[in-house]
Image (cartoon, grey):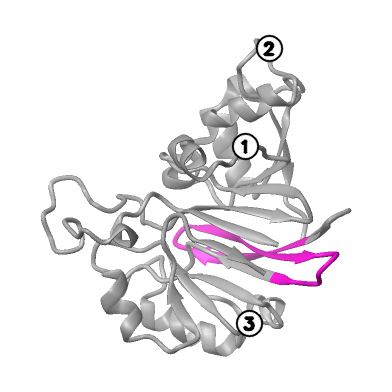
């Protein structure tokens, strides 16, 4: 299994507009953060999770050249606004609609933003086409399984995702954009080879976990390695990672994780 971190930043990205703080002006490339999304390759199946505003640019930079299915964790702007750029992947499929899984809230947002794309095939060459479906609690695929759980995130629920590759048995958990990780989600993630957790910033936030809260959840799950994502300009990669337990790292754009 391979995981490509296309984006690891918050909704404002880093550097932020009109900010000259130490992180926004940092020369460390790991402090340059696009909005949050990942690409997972599981036994050759290409799964895209979310499409940030920079999605097209990040696909070009990381050479993401194919998508088999798309999962939208929730309908907030920083996760959905790049979906129109999925049109290229529909075009590569001969105009066939791309399967999109999400929550009720996520599907409602896709319907309101992209009504022109809800069809079995692209109406014109080069246009997007989406086939929408509720994400099941367990999606059985030839290449493995994707299990889902709901995570509280302000006024909505985010999809937490657990990928298990059939050939290797490797297990990967992705829990972005959440205020806490409920007991059932902790149990679902146990046995993971790697975990990604929302760790927005050092200080409290009403709908995201802090770095300290995410570190506590990482210890509770007990994976060999956990990564923090959805990071703000309050987080310097080097400085924050130096203060973390050895099993918790800071994710960065372009990092490739092979399990």
Q: Which residue is at the front of the view, 2 or 23?
A: 2
Give how far across and how far down residue 26 sits, in percent.
19, 60
Image spot of residue 98 (x, y percent): 71, 33
Q: Which residue corresponds to the image point at 46% horizontal and 43% vertical from the top-left?
A: 52
Q: Position of residue 187 (x, y in %)?
A: 69, 82
Query: Is residue 203 in sight in this rendering?
Result: no
Establish if 11 lies above or below 66: below
Label 3 vs label 2, nearer the camera: 2
Using residue 84 as the reference point, say whether residue 95 is left or right of it: right
Q: Where the N terminus falls, by quadrant? A: bottom right
Earlier in the chain: of badge 3 and badge 1, it is 1
Residue in the foreground of this view, choosing between 169 and 216? 169
Left-right relation of 43 to 190: right
The answer to whether 174 is drawn above or below residue 210 in the figure is above
**Mark carried by residue 65:** 1
User: Helix, strand or loop at disc 1?
Assistant: loop
The residue that label 3 is drawn on is 183
- Which residue lies at the image location 57% right of the left edge and 35% below the top edge? 110
Q: Label 1: few (<14), some or many (≥20) within 10 Å?
A: few
Which badge, 3 or 2, is on the more N-terminal residue? 2
Compared to residue 26, the image places residue 221 above or below, namely below
Residue at 68 percent of width and 12 percent of height: 123
In the depicted view, which residue is nearer to us: 50 or 29? Answer: 29
Residue ranking furthest to the right: 142
Q: Helix, strand, or loop for circle 3? A: helix
| Nearer-N-terminus badge (1/2) | 1
Distance from Cα at disc 3 to Cα at disc 1? 37 Å
Give the farthest residue toward the top.
124
Is residue 153 one of those drawn in magenta?
A: yes
Mark 3 or 1: in front is 1
**Callout 2: helix, strand or loop?**
loop
């Amino acid at each position: 299994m391979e995981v490509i971190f296309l984006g690891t930043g918050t909704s404002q990205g880093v550097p932020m507009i009109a900010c000259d703080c130490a992180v926004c002006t940092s020369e460390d490339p790991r402090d340059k953060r696009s909005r949050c999304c990942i690409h997972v390759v599981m036994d050759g199946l290409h799964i895209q999770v979310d499409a940030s505003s920079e999605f097209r640019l990040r696909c070009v930079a990381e050479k993401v050249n194919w998508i088999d299915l798309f999962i939208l964790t929730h309908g907030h702007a920083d996760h959905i606004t790049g979906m129109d750029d999925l049109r290229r992947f529909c075009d590569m499929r001969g105009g066939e609609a791309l399967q999109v899984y999400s929550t009720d809230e996520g599907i409602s947002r896709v319907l309101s933003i992209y009504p022109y794309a809800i069809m079995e095939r692209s109406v014109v060459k080069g246009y997007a086409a989406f086939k929408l479906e509720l994400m099941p609690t367990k999606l059985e695929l030839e290449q493995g399984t994707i299990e889902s759980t709901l995570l509280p995130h302000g006024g909505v629920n985010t999809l937490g995702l657990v990928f298990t590759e059939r050939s290797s048995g490797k297990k990967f958990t992705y829990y972005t954009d959440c205020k806490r990780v409920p007991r059932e989600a902790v149990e679902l993630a146990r046995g993971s080879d790697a975990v990604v957790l929302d760790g927005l910033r050092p200080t409290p936030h009403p709908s995201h976990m802090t770095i300290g809260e995410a570190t506590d959840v990482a210890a509770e799950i007990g994976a060999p390695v956990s990564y923090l994502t959805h990071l703000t300009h309050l987080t310097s990669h080097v400085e924050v990672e130096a203060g973390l337990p050895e099993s918790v790292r800071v994710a960065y754009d372009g990092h490739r994780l092979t399990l």
